[in-house]
């Protein structure tokens, strides 16, 4: 983003001389490998937009072999027992979130998704619940449990098993007897889902069961009828979990049919508790293939890591043996996911042995999707510097508004890109954020504090918070991250401007990046616990010549890998904006070139096609569409999308008055 009064930007061909110097950060290794086949389960599943998860037991998190495999291989976790009723609400109204939090916080800090398991289940249910005989009492106990637990984990749990195992085994196709069915009637499931939706509208709500994998089984049919009925009547349900505890033969031959029949009702399907007696390679591969063949099969979870961790350990049903070594079924699973067994055999068990990102990129651009909507008091020339999250069924976009009289911020939301142009623009200068110089927003949800943060520049690095992203009036007044410009920036900024503040956190620390329009990328840090206070240790994270490392840096975690991606906007030899990219295994660097040159850019007019017509030569300040919305800024590893600012190539004059519009890039060379 550009601050006020940057008139007369130099666009001379001298830029060509400046854009080629290498990043001076020492210790840069080679670029990421060309191969797009990953060598871990999570990274490979991510290439098709899926996750590969495991059940996790809090009691094993002190075991280094266990956590080593967990963090290397899996990008989703399900607490095996820690979120069940008998752990969380052992006595009425007294909630124990300790063990569940241990798993949830660890998952968040490792960029792993979290499945919540489970809210309403007849088993592992304390006797104070199962002995209730009064319907009103039980209804309020059930609703309260759902509400309290979902509130507590709001923003952390991607999908909840709202109701677990409510159907009977055998030929009846009916619900099993349980305190819930017997006291509340079969409507308890609908009640539970409705309560769950209002408790956390952003979480996916699943029905989860076992022995529903064979299409012709009466139990499968019973669950299918219920889901069909829910969809027909608008009862909120988003997904069906097929536990998939298989015998030695693996999945039934109709498994894929079952997955696609459920999916055709308009729900996602997930394999939620996979384990297979004796773990034959073919049985695992068949299970994985069935999921990959169904577009709405969004992920697979195995029910434990090593055989010794399994609830059926006598049957050796998992992918790792007791010592943590990969079993043959691991290889067949990875291969079925599309991964490279060869890479696996030669590769050391390094957490960074794979990146799913290619080392060159190609994109297709939309036309201009968002243009300024001036009103009587906002005479806006350009809409710029977008930040975007997808949350609760909507894209939420924050952007700078630019005109010769200055910069401020705007918010809009919409459910689909086709509606971006017609969304209402909420000008944030009318809120507590206030009038005056505010620009280059960045939005994310802080899961620890359960608050949305909007980071932006005001001359200092500033932020506002809001409990509800969809309420433009909910933002707090600006506060500064620093008491004043850190010395190292003051010493290096020259004639530049201090711009484009960016926050990203890992499990321990939060980092604040910023640029100086003078060839330096700065980084400060604080602890996750102290954030937003305590940003110190400001250092130069990267440097190059002025126009080669100009501004608008983005830093992301790549889902399913231990890699971070750095993008910085440069000005090319043609005077046009483009992005360079680097990767690192740590937010503290060092950064290795990925697609970092003008001839192999991350995104530049030269690697972007414009099927709807070339409306811009600049690919400028923007943001990736993230996989989540929290402080880890996790992005998918494939089919990247980037929301950017572009403008009419013939427009000129005052920089602050240029006609910037927002467009969306979609990666076209993803192999996913
Ligand atoms: O039974 C297999 C799974 C079927 N679907 C629902 C899942 O939630 C269920 O998981 C298992 C856990 O893997 C076991 O670990 O659920 C069992 C309980 O139904 C869990 O077993 C319990 C033992 O019954 C307890 O005695 C023990 O204290 O594990 C607890 C913690 O180790």
Image (cartoon, rainbow, N blue to C red):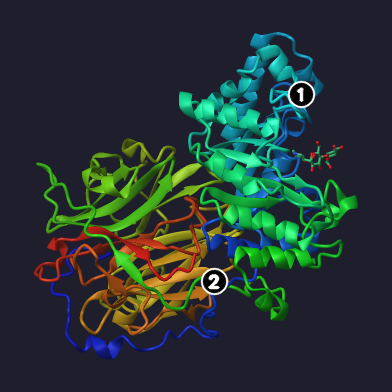
Q: Residue 261 falls in which quadrant of the image?
A: top right
> On screen, 92 above or below 298?
above
**Residue to which mark 1 is pinned:** 91
> Of the residues under marks 1 and 2, which one precedes in the sequence?
1
Q: State the image coordinates of residue 328 (x, y, percent, origin top left).
A: 78, 67
Quadrant observed for ligand 1 in the rendered image: top right
For marks 1 and 2, give the CA distance. Answer: 45 Å
Nearer to us in this view, 106 or 535 = 106
**Residue to which mark 2 is pinned:** 588
> On screen, 47 above or below 599?
above
> On screen, 44 above or below 52?
below
Please give the name of the residue rendered at 59% of the width and 60% of the height, measured from the top-left corner.
45
The answer to whether one can see residue 159 in this image is: yes
Q: Residue furthest bottom?
A: 17
Q: Nearer the viewer, mark 1 or mark 2?
A: 1
> On screen, 297 above or below 657?
above
Q: Residue 342 falls in which quadrant of the image?
A: bottom right
- Asked which secondary structure carries label 2, the reply is loop
Q: State the image coordinates of residue 383 (x, y, percent, origin top left).
A: 21, 55
Please give the name of the residue rendered at 24% of the width and 67% of the height, measured from the top-left corner.
610
Q: Residue furthest right?
A: 314
Location of the N terminus by quadrant is: bottom left
The answer to whether one can see residue 457 in this image is: no
Q: State the image coordinates of residue 453 (x, y, percent, origin top left).
A: 42, 48
Does the CB distance between marks 1 and 2 fall below 8 Å?
no
Around disc 2, counting alpha carbons within 10 Å, would you say few (fewer than 14), some (14 to 19), or many (20 or more)? some
Callout count = 2
Please give the name of the residue rendered at 64% of the width and 31% of the height, measured from the top-left corner.
221
Q: State the image coordinates of residue 562 (x, y, percent, origin top left).
A: 59, 67
Question: Which numbered tag is attached to residue 102?
Answer: none
């Amino acid at each position: 983003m550009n601050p006020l009064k940057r008139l007369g930007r130099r666009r001379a061909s001298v830029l060509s001389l400046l854009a080629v110097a290498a990043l001076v950060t020492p210790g840069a290794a080679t670029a990421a490998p060309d191969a797009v086949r990953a060598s871990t389960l999570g990274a490979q599943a991510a290439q098709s937009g899926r996750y590969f998860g495991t059940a996790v037991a809090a009691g094993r998190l002190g075991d280094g072999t266990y956590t080593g495999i967990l963090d290397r291989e899996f990008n989703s976790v399900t607490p095996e027992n820690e979120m069940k009723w008998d752990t969380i609400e052992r006595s009425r109204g007294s909630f124990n979130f300790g063990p569940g939090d241990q798993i949830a916080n660890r998952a968040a800090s490792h960029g792993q998704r979290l499945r919540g398991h489970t809210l309403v289940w007849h088993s592992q249910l304390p006797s104070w619940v199962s002995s209730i005989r009064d319907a009103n009492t039980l209804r309020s106990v059930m609703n309260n449990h759902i509400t309290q637990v979902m509130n507590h984990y709001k923003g952390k749990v991607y999908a909840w098993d709202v109701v677990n195992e409510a159907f009977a085994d055998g030929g009846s196709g009916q619900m099993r007897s349980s305190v819930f069915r017997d006291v509340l009637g079969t409507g308890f499931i609908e009640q539970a889902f409705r309560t769950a939706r209002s408790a956390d509208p952003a979480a996916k709500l699943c029905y989860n069961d076992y022995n529903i994998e064979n299409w012709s089984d009466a139990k499968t049919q019973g669950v299918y009828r219920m889901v069909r009925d829910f969809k027909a009547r608008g009862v909120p349900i988003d997904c069906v979990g097929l536990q998939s505890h298989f015998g030695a033969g693996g999945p039934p031959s109709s498994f894929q049919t079952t997955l696609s029949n459920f999916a055709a009702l308009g729900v996602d399907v997930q394999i939620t508790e996979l384990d297979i007696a004796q773990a034959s390679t073919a049985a695992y591969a068949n299970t994985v293939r069935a999921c990959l063949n169904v577009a709405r099969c969004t992920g697979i979870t195995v029910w434990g890591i090593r055989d010794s961790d399994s609830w059926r350990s006598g049957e050796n049903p998992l992918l790792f043996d007791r010592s943590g070594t990969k079993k043959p079924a691991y290889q067949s699973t990875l291969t079925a996911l599309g991964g490279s067994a060869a890479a696996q055999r030669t590769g050391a068990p390094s957490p960074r042995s794979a990146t799913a990102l290619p080392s060159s990129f190609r994109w297709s651009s939309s036309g201009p999707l968002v243009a300024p909507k001036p009103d009587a008091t906002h005479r806006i020339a350009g809409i710029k510097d977008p930040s975007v999250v997808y949350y609760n069924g909507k894209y939420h976009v924050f952007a700078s508004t630019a005109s010769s009289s200055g910069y401020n911020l705007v918010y809009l939301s919409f459910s689909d890109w086709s509606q971006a142009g017609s969304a209402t623009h909420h000008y944030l200068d009318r809120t507590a954020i206030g009038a005056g110089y505010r620009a280059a927003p960045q939005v994310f949800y802080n899961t620890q504090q359960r608050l949305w943060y909007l980071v932006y520049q005001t001359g200092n690095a500033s932020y506002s918070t809001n409990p509800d992203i969809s309420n433009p009036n909910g933002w707090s007044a600006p506060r500064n991250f620093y008491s004043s410009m850190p010395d190292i920036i003051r010493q290096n900024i020259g004639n530049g401007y201090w711009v484009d503040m960016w926050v990203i956190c890992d499990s321990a620390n939060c980092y604040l990046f910023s640029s100086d329009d003078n060839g330096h990328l700065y980084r400060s840090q604080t602890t996750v616990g102290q954030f937003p206070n305590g940003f110190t240790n400001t250092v130069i994270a990267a440097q190059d010549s002025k126009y080669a490392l100009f501004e608008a840096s983005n830093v992301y975690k790549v889902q399913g890998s231990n890699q971070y991606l750095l993008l910085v906007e440069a000005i090319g030899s043609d005077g046009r904006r483009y992005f360079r990219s680097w990767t690192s295994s740590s937010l503290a660097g060092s950064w290795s070139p990925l697609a970092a040159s003008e001839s192999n850019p991350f995104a530049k007019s030269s690697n972007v096609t414009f099927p709807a017509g070339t409306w811009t030569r600049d690919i400028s300040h923007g943001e990736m569409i993230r996989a989540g919305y929290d402080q880890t800024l996790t992005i998918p590893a494939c089919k990247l999308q980037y929301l950017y600012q572009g403008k009419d190539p013939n427009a000129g004059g005052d920089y602050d008055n240029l006609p910037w519009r927002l467009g969306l890039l979609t990666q076209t060379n993803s192999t996913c």
